[in-house]
């Protein structure tokens, strides 16, 4: 299996974010299976026509999100990210709900603000 990623140079979204988002989508959908070895930073940068730092930044973000894991000199692999991503999202949602309650927002008000934030975040990508 080869990794085919196409970035849009005319997009208002930064190349590293396009790359991070696309790899994340592929990993979470199962199109990139757990254990799939990603290209090296330099090799992928050459293939995509990007600076190595751009690919490295995307890889760091993906690793922080639990989507990929680096195993030293063995390379970078797709992690079992679904559970980690779900846990992180649930933790963030729980923290938001607790903060909204402490601020005195109604349940409907808190949900409305959360929906607005999600809509804005997904519209930006």
Image (tube, helix red, strand yellow):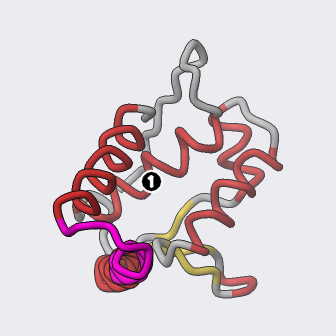
The residue range painted magenta reads: 94-107
Residue 17 is a magenta residue:
no
Residue extending farthest left: 108
Q: Which residue is mark 1?
A: 23
Q: Main secondary structure of the magenta part?
A: helix
Residue at the (33%, 49%) spot, across then down: 118
In this rendered view, identify the residue nearer to me: 70 or 95: 95
Residue 80, visible in the rendered structure: no
Q: Quadrant of the C terminus?
A: top left
- What percent of the width, then of the height, locates residue 111? 22, 60
Residue at the (72%, 43%) spot, across then down: 45
In the rendered image of this protein, does residue 49 appear above or below residue 112? above
- What percent of the width, then of the height, locates residue 44? 65, 47
Residue at the (73%, 38%) spot, across then down: 46
84 left or right of 46? Answer: left
Residue 102 is a magenta residue:
yes
- What percent of the width, then of the height, locates residue 81? 37, 78
Quadrant of the rendered image containing residue 24:
bottom left
120 left or right of 60? Answer: left
């Amino acid at each position: 299996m080869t990794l085919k990623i196409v970035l849009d140079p005319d997009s208002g979204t930064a190349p590293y974010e396009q790359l991070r988002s696309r790899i994340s989508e592929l990993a979470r959908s199962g199109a990139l299976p757990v254990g799939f070895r990603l290209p090296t930073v330099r090799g992928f940068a050459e293939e995509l026509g990007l600076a190595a730092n751009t690919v490295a930044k995307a890889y760091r973000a993906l690793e922080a999100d639990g989507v990929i894991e680096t195993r030293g000199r063995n390379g970078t692999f797709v992690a079992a990210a679904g559970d980690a991503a779900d846990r992180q999202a649930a933790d963030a949602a729980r923290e938001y709900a607790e903060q909204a309650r402490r601020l005195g927002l109604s349940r409907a008000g808190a949900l409305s603000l959360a929906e607005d934030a999600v809509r804005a975040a997904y519209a930006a990508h």
